[in-house]
Image (cartoon, rainbow, N blue to C red):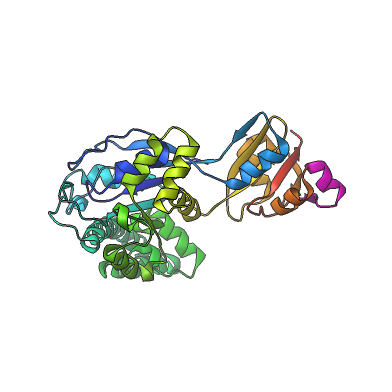
Amino acid sequence: MGLKCGIVGLPNVGKSTLFNALTNAKALAANYPFATKDPNLGVITVPDKRLEKLAEFVKPQRILPTTVDILDIAGLIKGASKGEGLGNQFLANIREVDAIIHVIRCFDNDNVVHVDGSVNPLRDKEIIDLELIFKDIDTVEKRIEKLKKNAKSGNKEEIKKLEFAQTLLEHLELEKPARTFTVEEESLMDLLKDMHLLTLKPVMYVCNVDEDSVLSGNEYTQAVASAIQDEQAEMVIIAAGIEADIIELESDEDKMEFLQDMGLDEPGVNKVIHAAYKLLNLITYFTAGEKEVRAWTVHDGAKAPEAAGVIHTDFEKGFIRAEVIAYEDYLQCGSESAAREAGKLRVEGKEYRVIDGDIMHFLFNV
């Protein structure tokens, strides 16, 4: 679907280490600021036990999970909104993504340099937040100037848009992100979206901790959790260094043994991936046949023709109907034919909204 998450944070907080663990890539992870200058683009495979379970029943020739793109963006410093450091490049990269993964350093280690000389997660978070807000203030101020010219005509709709933008500016000047701004009218929501504000993007906070804090967190993660209570944002605790060690292990057995020794039931990156998927408001449906069992991504709320179009645009254009089996029904019956015989296969039309986990087959005519 072309959706991207962007990993952001101050320099040297573990962004590239996390990126490597998420993608099995080898972005430069170094103990000095601005090790990442150009953004690294990677592809995350979304782990899904349902896909594996379906494959056990179908025994296909291949299994294809769904994926999400991820961008490892250069570290930001105070003053980025005015072009300090790699500020202009950083902010331009953030504008490209659909959601933000904000990595915050929540561990002490004298051997790992901090760009501001000390570990303070709330200060670090505030620096990123404010730089994005400052950039949005600049964007809204420019839009207000255009709206003022339009409002001179006396058009009530244009005057309403101007008043809306001015109220939004006041909200941002209170150092509040655009995603917490309340919008009641759809036309004004369209105006808000058209501004492409950085702080309108959904955000997830990833607290990068040491090995001892990976299970229950620490005082740093507690402070972050308290600070984001009003943001309706998700927070995940991981130890990026441990995740980097896990991906170096060759066999699944070795990885599982490593996790068990740590008291973990799955890699921390899996939690990040699932949270990122949720952040993008995505769900998964499946196709299951002898050639392949495959996971597909759609927005939550997508209708059947849109889901068909993810496979091929011709499927959407010539959509006739969809044959749908709920995931639990498929497991209970054991096969498509058995589900059909049991009356668990449903025929759905153009208005059907896809449910996460649906097994679907599309009939179309081009």
Query: Can you tell which quarter of the image residue 23 is in?
Result: top left
The answer, for residue 329, to whether it is visible in the render is: yes
- Whether 347 is among the magenta residues is yes
**What quarter of the picture does the C terminus occupy?**
top right
State whether residue 78 is above or below residue 36: below
**What x and y, as percent, mark residue 63?**
61, 34
Side (left or right) of 205 relative to 37: right
The answer, for residue 93, to whether it is visible in the render is: no
Side (left or right) of 225 relative to 334: left
Q: Residue at x 30, y 63 (%)?
A: 218
Q: Residue at x 40, y 63 (%)?
A: 233
Side (left or right) of 6 relative to 110: right
Q: Which residues are magenta?
A: 336-349
State whether residue 154 is above or below residue 283: below
**What x and y, as percent, mark residue 238?**
36, 53
Q: Residue at x 42, y 44 (%)?
A: 258
**What x and y, as percent, mark residue 20?**
36, 38
* Front-lying residue, 264 or 88: 264
**What x and y, as percent, mark residue 5?**
41, 47
